[in-house]
Structure formats: C-alpha cells, structure tokens
Image (cartoon, coloured by chain):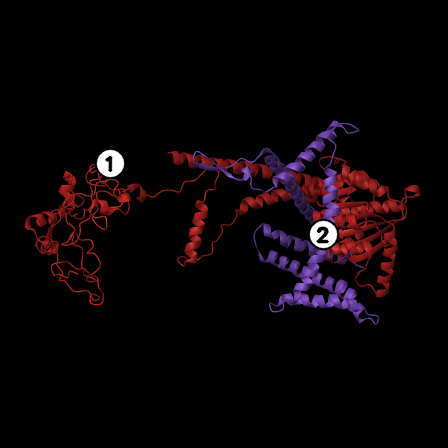
Chain colours: A red, B purple
C-alpha cells in the first residue's frame, strides 16, 4: 500500500486517488466516436455532457507497438511526457503535477464564453491524510487500481484481454481510443459508445393493440398516490349543460302530452300481431268451468306498462263469463304472486277492471321463487293477509279443487326470468299445460322463442301489443271502460320516434366529431 | 272502502311524489332525495310486514304454537336462526348449513327446470325443415335457415379454445392478432342484432313507463283536480 505523501487523496474520505490527474483544460478534445467529427459528440444527448468535456489522461502501455493516431496523441496529457523525460515514478509525477501545474491552471475550452477563456484558477493541494480505516484493513493483496504498471507487477498482455473486449483492438483507425480505467485499461476501443441509447424513445405501438398511454398515465398516477408523493384529491365533475338537457326534456314531455290530450293514436290502427291473436284465441277457446291461474309477478315500477294488459285480460275474461249462450264461460281465477307487491297490484288491477270479487281466489304471496311455484302447483298454501285460519283453510280446499280443473296459466312478469321460471317449473310439474305471458317490451325478443316452440300460447308484450289486443279483441266489448293502452299508443309512438331521431342523430354527430378530431390530430402529426 | 275524496287525496300524494322524483331531471335536490328515501323505506317496511305476516306467522309460528304442533317445523326454525348468525362474523359459520340447503335446493330446481323447460325444448324447436316440401313454404325455409344459421354461429362464437384464431401471427416482425373465421364473425353479427333488438325494447319499455306517468299526472290527477 503506497501512502506516499506525494499522492493525492480524497478530501472527504481521505482515500488515495488514482494516479491520473484530470486536465482542467477542455481544449484537448473529447472522445471521438465512430462517424463523429473531431471534438466528440456535439450536443443533443441529455446526460452525456461528460462527452463534451476533456478526456482523462490515458497511460501508454509499454507493450503496445502501435503508434497512437495524431488526434489521440494530441489528447495525451502532459503527465505522460513528464514521465518519459524525467523517469520519475508515477506517484512522484502526480504529486509534482499537482503542485507545479494544477496549482495554477488556465481555463480554456471552446464551450466556455470568451470572457472565461484564459482565466487562471488557483487550485489547492490537500495534505495527505491517512484514512481512518487504514489501520484496520489490509489492502496489500488488492491491485493498485487503476494505476499503471508498477515495478514487479506484470503488464497487461493482449492475450489477457477477453475476446469480447478486444474485437477492435487491431483497428486503430475506427477506434483509436483506449480504455482509461478499469481492468481493460489500455485496450483500444473495446466498447464503442452508442449515443443512440441515451436518446428518449417512444414505446412502439403495434397494429391491433390498444394504445396504452392512457393506462400508463393512470398507472403512474396510482404509483405516485400509493407512494405518497401525491395526495388524492376529489375531482369535481363539470355539470351537464342544463339548458340543452332541459330543452330536450321539455320537448319530449310536449310530444307525449299532446297526443294524450287529444286522445288520438295518430298513426291509425295497430297491426294485429300473431302472438296477440293467439292470446285472444286461447282465451276464447277455454272450456266450460275452467280455472285460470293468474300470477302477478311484477313490482309497482312496471305497473304503467303491465297493468293495462292485465286489466284488458280481466275485462276480456269478464266478458267471456258474462256472455250468453255457448260463448259464456264459468271461469274461476286463482291469483298468486311471487313478489311481495304483486298481491296489492293484483287487487288494483281487479278494481280497475270489470271483474268482481266473485270467482277470485287470492292465494297471496308465494315465497321462494322456483320453490314457491313448484309448491303452488302441487300443494297450494294460501297466505292471504288479514284472513282467519278458517278462511285460509277454505281457500286452500277451493284451490285444490280448482287446480284439478286448471286449464291455463297466465303470468304477468316484469322480466324474462320470471316467465321462464313459470315455464320451466310448470313444464316439469304440469307438462302440456297451456301458458301465456304478459311482459314488457324489453322481454319480447327473449320470450319469442318460447312462442315458436309452443311453450307459450300467447304473449302480450308492452303497450303496442296491448293496444292491438284492446282494439281487435276488446273493441265493442268494453263499452264503459276506457282503453288505456289504446289511448297511450299515440304518445308512445311519438316518443319512440323522437328517441330514435335523437339516438341516430347523436351517433352520427358523435361519429363525425370523433372522425374530425382524429383527422385533425393526424394532420397535426404529419405536419 | 275508500271514498272519492280519499282516492283523490291518495292520487295527489302519488302525483306530488312523482313530480319530486322527476325533479331530478333538473338536478339533484332535496325533494328527489326525500322521495327516494321514502320509496326505499316503504319498500323495506312492506317487505318486512309481508315476510312476518304472510310467511313467518302463518307458516311457522302458528303451527308451532298449536296444540297439534308439527315437530318437523323445528328444523326450518333452527336453520332460520342459524342463518341469523351470518350477520355476526363469529357466528357466520352457523349459517353455512342453512345457506347450503337453500342454494342446493334452489340450484337443483333451477337446473332441472332449465333442462326440461328450456334447453331440450329450445333445441328441439331449432330442428326445422330446410326443404320446401310437405307443406313448408319457401318463406318458411328462408326463415328456418336464418334461425338455424344464427343459432349455430352464435353458439360457435362462444367457443373458447387454443387454435389458430386465438393466436397471434407474426408477419414482417409485426405481431397482429389472427383474423377470426367467418362463422365467428357472423355469430357476432347475430349477437349485435339481438342486442340491438333488446336495446330497442328497453327504450320502448322506459318510454311506456314515462308515458304512463304523464298519463297518470294528466288524466288521473290534474284534469279531475281541475274538474275537467
């Protein structure tokens, strides 16, 4: 371990510095890259400013027989020349250099402004101090890195350089530089500098893949929030433009109110649909003294669409019951509900229809969904509110008798699954039992296959079907009752047309705006 | 029995609540919140009353209190009490048996019903003639062909297997997803048409509900209130 006072030491830790003195003059030229002009890389690389600065001195290897190129020779520091002339040890040369030359250095660099050129800078040479841990540790086995060869130490041979690091050793023209530090010291151009790798690259986007920039921004934001760098703040969403929305709502209400006031269907008689025709025909084909199981399986929120159909069905059944002669039917109704609100809605529908309290057997609420349906078809259990035990027992016996004459099941369901439940459970428990459904318009497309397969004998889907049913099957039958669906069909048609126009116009305008913004962005990118 | 005045009073309350709900179209406001909370509260209270008076009392408590009590009803009583343990973390395990019984019976019924009531009948209903013979018209053949092709392509579009259609092909050092086969694209188009029909039906349903509410406000409340 050479702790000679002639050598330089770190000001902070007291560690001995390498025996290479950086030149304070930047005019000696930087490392020249392949294909680059003299003077090294000229700007444009972030974080690579060291390439613009001076090159550390490179000691010559005595084994090297090649002469360095003129540029590299000009860049050789003066320390090497002093060594050749005086024959002093590198440690002595370093100390001498520090004291004689670097104590008064002249600043000269093409990168500095003119007023800084030629300024003499006084430098301070620190007194060597021994490191604090020098007495405890033994560095005698370690090489004197990265100093040049010392007495008794074998020089670096070309054969010692690994193959991957010496691929350009024999081509001094393309790579005239030598490695100045590390184990590859003295080797010419083992690793050429690739300035491109320091440039910022945008991640390539492949066709058919989603653009991940938005997701990446969200991920970065999440990482910053999770790391505590950014505190999450509530975002106040901009309020929707009230004027446009209010105008649309006002227009929609106006389009609905006017046909309702004038009580006009506007677009004539609705067509007679096959499912509606089958619905009426099935009721007219009921045998004498038959029982109909009527299930009200909807909530109050759907009553505006389903109640007119239920009321129209009850009116039709009442007229069939009151008809004289062969057209008259003795019909018994068993009313159940698989929803809690269905019981009350069934009573409301009955009160709005012409069906009285006679032949109306209310079994109440069926709990359990599919289990309740299966139980109803096998062993009915009445759950009427405010009924005594005797009344319930009487109802149960009547239901058992009536179910033996069960001729039809009508399900008033708020969605497809309710009707499916009845179709599936009745298909197991009472296969072949005629069944019809009253459902909203949204369920029509999913219930139509059951019509095609014969599992449903009729379907009233929404106000349009109900209006057709009222006009073609109840027109003239119900003289005193107002035909609700027939009154609403005009307003519904206008509202549906308005919504159709809004949806189409909104999609077209939206597509136009998106394409226009995309075209503008592409034009800006091309420019 | 409700009188005319009582009926008009109830209709007025219903109309005011309807207007309070529709005030949300302008913006969120306390009137809408009040109507919303009233709806939730009355729904929960109604469901509680129904469950108590129509299920628990007549089907469980009264038979158990009767002299000729049915001891088999102790089983649902115990299972129901165990189900209450689900509300406490320490007693959650007690409700597993009750929940398993409910789920098991429900799934058994649903599976059997779906198999007998939907899958088999609908599969049979898809087996339609494709030749205009035996009383089958050309129009029926076309409809049947569309139905069969639509059913098969939609079913095949839901197949998930590791094949060429699911792999990425590399051409000119650019990785692109492979083009799906024609039948899968056709199945997706049938799905799109179905979704469009459902969306149209949903729009019609909600428009019908809106028309119903406005009809109620106009013909059932405002005009009778004004004596028109």
Answer whether residue B225 is visible to the viewer in this image. no
Q: Position of residue A58 (x, y in %)?
A: 17, 47
Q: Which residue does the image show at 60% across and 58% down from the upper left? A: B33
Query: Which residue is more in the foreground, A518 or A484?
Result: A518
Q: Is residue A393 visible?
A: yes
Q: Secondary structure at mark 1?
A: loop
Q: Is residue A63 left or right of residue A166?
A: left
Q: Where does residue A500 sit, x and y in percent of width and height?
A: 62, 38
- Of residues A92 and A105, which is closer to you in this image? A92
Q: Tags 1 and 2 in contact by the CB under 8 Å rule? A: no
Q: Which residue position is annotated with label 2?
A: B110
Q: Nearer the viewer, residue B145 or A369?
A: B145
Other residues around mark 2 within 10 Å, as few (<14) / some (14–19) / many (≥20):
some
| Residue pictured at 11% horizontal, 59% vertical | A6
A458 sits left or right of B87 in the view: right
Where residue A16 sits in the image (x, y, percent)? 18, 59
x and y percentages locating residue A312 in the rendered image: 79, 45
State which quadrant residue A165 falls in: top left
Chain for mark 2? B
Badge 1: chain ID: A
- Residue position marked by numbered label 1 in the rendering: A35
Q: Which image quarter holds the N terminus of chain B?
A: bottom right
Q: How many marks?
A: 2
User: Could you tell me which secondary element the residue under label 2 belongs to?
Assistant: helix
Badges 1 and 2, same chain: no
Q: Image check: A502 left or right of A144?
A: right
In the displayed structure image, the side of residue A515 where residue B45 appears, left or right: right
Identity of the residue furthest to the right in this view: A325
């Amino acid at each position: 371990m050479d702790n000679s006072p002639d050598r330089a030491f770190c000001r902070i830790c007291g560690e001995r510095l390498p025996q290479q003195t950086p030149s304070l003059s930047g005019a000696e030229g930087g490392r020249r890259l392949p294909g680059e002009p003299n003077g090294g890389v000229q700007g444009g690389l972030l974080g690579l400013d060291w390439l613009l600065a001076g090159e550390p001195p490179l000691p010559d290897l005595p084994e090297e027989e090649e002469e360095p190129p003129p540029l590299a020779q000009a860049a050789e520091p003066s320390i090497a020349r002093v060594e050749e002339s005086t024959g002093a040890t590198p440690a002595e040369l370093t100390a001498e250099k520090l004291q004689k030359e670097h104590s008064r250095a002249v600043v000269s660099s093409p990168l500095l402004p003119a007023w800084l050129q030629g300024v003499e800078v006084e430098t301070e040479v620190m007194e060597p101090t021994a490191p604090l841990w020098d007495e405890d540790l033994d560095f005698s086995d370690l090489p004197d890195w990265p100093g040049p060869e010392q007495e008794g130490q074998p020089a670096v041979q070309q054969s010692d350089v690994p193959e991957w690091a010496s691929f350009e050793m024999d081509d001094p023209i393309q790579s005239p530089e030598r490695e100045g530090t590390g184990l590859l010291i003295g080797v010419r151009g083992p690793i050429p500098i690739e300035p491109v790798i320091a440039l910022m690259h945008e991640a390539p986007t492949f066709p058919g893949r989603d653009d991940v920039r938005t997701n990446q921004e969200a991920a970065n934001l999440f990482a910053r929030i999770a790391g505590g760098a950014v505190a999450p703040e509530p975002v106040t969403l901009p309020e929707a433009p009230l004027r446009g929305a209010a105008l649309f709502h006002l227009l929609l209400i106006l389009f609905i109110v006017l046909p309702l006031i004038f009580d006009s269907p506007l677009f004539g008689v609705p067509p007679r649909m096959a499912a509606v025709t089958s619905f009426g025909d099935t009721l007219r084909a009921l045998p004498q003294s038959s029982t109909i199981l009527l299930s009200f399986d909807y909530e109050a929120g759907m009553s505006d669409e389903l109640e007119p159909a239920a009321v129209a069905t009850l009116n039709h059944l009442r007229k069939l019951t009151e008809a004289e002669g062969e057209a008259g039917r003795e019909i018994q109704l068993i009313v159940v509900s698989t929803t809690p609100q269905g019981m009350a809605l069934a009573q409301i529908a009955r009160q709005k229809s012409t069906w009285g309290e006679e032949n109306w057997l209310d079994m109440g609420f069926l709990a359990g969904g599919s289990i309740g349906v299966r139980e109803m078809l096998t062993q009915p259990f009445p759950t009427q509110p405010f009924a005594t035990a005797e009344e319930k027992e009487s109802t149960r016996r009547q239901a058992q008798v009536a179910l033996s004459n069960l001729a039809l099941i009508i399900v008033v369901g708020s969605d497809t699954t309710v009707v499916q439940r009845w179709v599936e459970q009745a298909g197991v428990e009472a296969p072949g039992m005629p069944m019809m459904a009253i459902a909203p318009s949204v369920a029509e497309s999913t219930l139509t296959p059951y019509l095609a397969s014969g599992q449903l004998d009729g379907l009233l889907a929404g106000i349009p079907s109900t209006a057709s049913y009222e006009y073609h099957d109840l027109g003239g039958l119900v003289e005193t009752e107002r035909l609700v669906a027939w009154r609403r069909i005009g307003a519904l048609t206008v509202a549906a047309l308005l919504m159709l126009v809004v949806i189409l116009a909104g999609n077209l305008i939206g597509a136009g705006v998106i394409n226009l913004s995309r075209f503008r962005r592409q034009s800006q990118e091309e420019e | 029995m409700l009188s005319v005045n009582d009926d008009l009073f109830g209709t007025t309350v219903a109309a005011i609540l309807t207007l309070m709900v529709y005030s949300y179209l302008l913006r969120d406001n306390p009137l809408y919140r009040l109507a919303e909370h009233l709806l939730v509260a009355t729904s929960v209270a109604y469901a509680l009353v129904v469950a108590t008076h129509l299920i628990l009392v007549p089907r469980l408590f009264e038979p158990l209190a009767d002299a000729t009590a049915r001891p088999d009803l102790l089983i649902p009583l115990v299972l129901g009490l165990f189900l209450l343990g689900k509300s406490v973390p320490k007693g959650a395990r007690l409700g597993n048996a009750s929940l398993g019984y409910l789920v098991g019976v429900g799934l058994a019924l649903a599976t059997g019903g779906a198999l007998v009531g939907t899958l088999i009948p609908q599969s049979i209903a898809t087996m339609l003639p494709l030749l205009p013979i035996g009383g089958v018209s050309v129009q029926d053949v076309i409809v049947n062909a569309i139905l069969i092709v639509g059913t098969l392509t939609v079913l095949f579009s839901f197949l998930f297997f590791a094949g060429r259609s699911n792999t990425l092909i590399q051409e000119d050092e650019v990785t692109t997803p492979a083009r799906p086969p024609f039948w899968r694209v056709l199945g997706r188009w049938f799905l799109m048409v179905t979704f469009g029909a459902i969306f149209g039906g949903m729009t019609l349903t909600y428009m019908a509900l809106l028309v119903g509410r406005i009809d109620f406000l106009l013909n059932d409340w405002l005009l009778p209130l004004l004596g028109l």
